[in-house]
Amino acid sequence: MKDKLVNLVTYRYDYRAEILKDKLEEEGIECVVTNASVFGQMTGFRVMVLEKDLEDAVKVYKYIQNLYDSHSAEVLEGPEE
């Protein structure tokens, strides 16, 4: 099912998720940012894309990471480098 939403990356801070969201949308990739939580505790901000767009979205993610030169503690979960 290619129209299923999948998690691209989870950031610790919302501003990083919004930067990526803006770039994905600029590239024509639909996405949403959701709050990730466990037992009511906020654990980050997920950037989710359609499964069919995942490969292109990973390229945009890697571009953004290189641009900001960080795969630091701000990324809680993301694609393998």
Image (cartoon, rainbow, N blue to C red):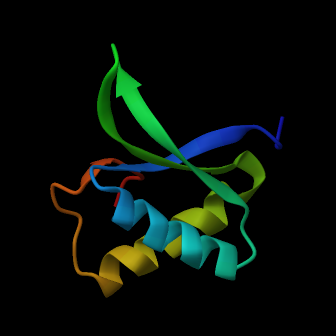
- Residue 20 % position (x, y): 48, 69
Residue closer to the observer: 11 or 39: 39
Q: Quadrant of the C terminus?
A: bottom left
Extreme residue toward the front, this view: 40
Identify the residue at horizontal 32%, vertical 81% (top origin). Answer: 66
Residue 46 vs residue 57: left or right? left
Identify the residue at horizontal 62%, vertical 41% (top origin). Answer: 6
Badge count: 0
Extreme residue toward the left, this view: 73
Identify the residue at horizontal 17%, vertical 61% (top origin). Answer: 72
Residue 53 vs residue 48: left or right? right
- Residue 56 % position (x, y): 64, 68
Extreme residue toward the top, this view: 39
- Residue 54 % position (x, y): 64, 56
Up/down of 31 relative to 66, above or below? above
Up/down of 64 relative to 73, above or below? below
Residue 45 vs residue 29: left or right? left
Identify the residue at horizontal 77%, vertical 52% (top origin). Answer: 52
Residue 34 vs residue 40: left or right? right
Which picture quadrant has residue 21? Answer: bottom right
Which picture quadrant has residue 5? Answer: top right
Q: Quadrant of the N terminus?
A: top right
- Residue 7 % position (x, y): 54, 43
